[in-house]
Image (tube, rainbow, N blue to C red):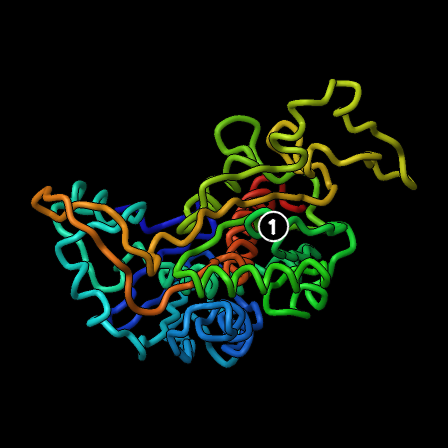
Amino acid sequence: MANTFGHMFRITTWGESHGDAIGVTVDGCPPRLPLEVEEIQKELDRRRPGQSEISTQRREGDRAEILSGVFEGETLGTPILIGVWNGDARSKDYDHMRRVYRPSHADYSYDAKYGIRNWKGGGRASARETIGRVAAGAIAKKILAREFGVEIVGYVKQVWKLHADVDSSTVTQEDVEANIARCPDQDMAVQMIERIKQARKDGDSLGGVVECVARGVPVGLGEPVFDKLEADLAKSVLSMPACKGFEVGSGFGGTILTGSQHNDPFYSDGGRIRTRTNNSGGIQGGISNGEDIVIRAAFKPTATIMREQNTVDVDGNEVTLQGRGRHDPCVLPRAVPIVESMVALVLADHALRQRGQRGSV
């Protein structure tokens, strides 16, 4: 099972949804980076369950503990181990799923691959695994902001058929955090919240799109062939639970444009080469060009719903299943800090690789 991600800045996540603890090991972090547990906690609190009426009501404090790699407020350059104790797992909610496969969940595919699965809370397939990603992402964000001047802002762009109008070049995290939908289009956020509430009342779930912008990214990050920057971003984002689609820049919308419409004209801005448009999403030839990197991640509706569904049990018998327990009717608001973290992990890794290759970025 591949649990490690990255090259120079590497993370390994560990733990299960209903296990004793869950967390991450971060290797490759430069020494003497100022780091306090409160910085990690701030990001985990954004991801934490039970924070609003439109998220899962599982109540977890998600208090981070730094167990190694930091001394007197600075990183040592050695592996950083961060753990979070699970405190509110209710495995009894999953008793009736012990021998039954949830439609569109990882239950069947895990069982088919390994011959065993942790049916309590989905085990490693649970979105709770992303605690480690967000904790590591907090460190990556610190490196990017301090060493390279990079800012990353994610937000909900779409829920169901509701599309927000957002200017990626100016949106701030304050705009995003102004409502529980994490949609900076405040009028559309009201509609999104009401639609998510209705889905929960109906015992159903909704999907949507998270957009994320990285500003101030240096020119030259990424490789020209197999480690293209957009390829690594796609891998990182698509590795998230429930993520089923990825776009960068114009994405699929660019397919209906002509070359003359889609090309980003270059111009000189005080000696710096810029582009007048950004259909490329800040990446050309697999390498960052200095413009804002803009990506979008599509998330399917939550698989576990409170409606009765047709499925099979582990013996292949056709049965029906109705979900129980506490689940997000829509993962989008809580996915925002996770998408940001995955983007940060890729950019930090490539920035450190570029520094090692060229001596500066």
| Residue matched to label 1 | 158
* Residue 336 seen by the camera: yes
- Tell me residue 152's x, y (percent): 65, 56
Q: Which amino acid, mark 1?
A: Gln
Where 68 falls versus 279 (above or below)? below
In the figure, is residue 83 to the left or right of 245?
A: left
Q: Residue at x 10, y 44 (%)?
A: 317
Give the side of residue 31 with respect to residue 89, left or right.
Answer: right
| Front-lying residue, 129 or 82 | 129
Q: Nearer the viewer, residue 82 or 304?
A: 304
Q: Is residue 104 above or below residue 24?
A: above
Residue 139 visible, this angle: no
Residue 121's quadrant in the figure? bottom left
Residue 220 lies in quadrant: top right
The image shows residue 123 at horizontal and vertical percentages of 25, 59
Estimate the x, y position of residue 160 in percent, counting from the top left.
Answer: 55, 49
The residue at the point 41 percent across, 46 percent down is 239
Between residues 173 and 109, which one lies in front from this camera angle? 109
Residue 169 located left or right of residue 324: right
Observer-nearest of 32 and 158? 158
From this view, report whether residue 241 is shown above or below residue 267.
Answer: below
- Residue at left offset 30%, top offset 49%: 105
Q: Reply above or below: 65 against 260.
A: below
Q: Label 1, secondary structure: give it.
A: strand
Quarter of the rendering containing residue 133: bottom left
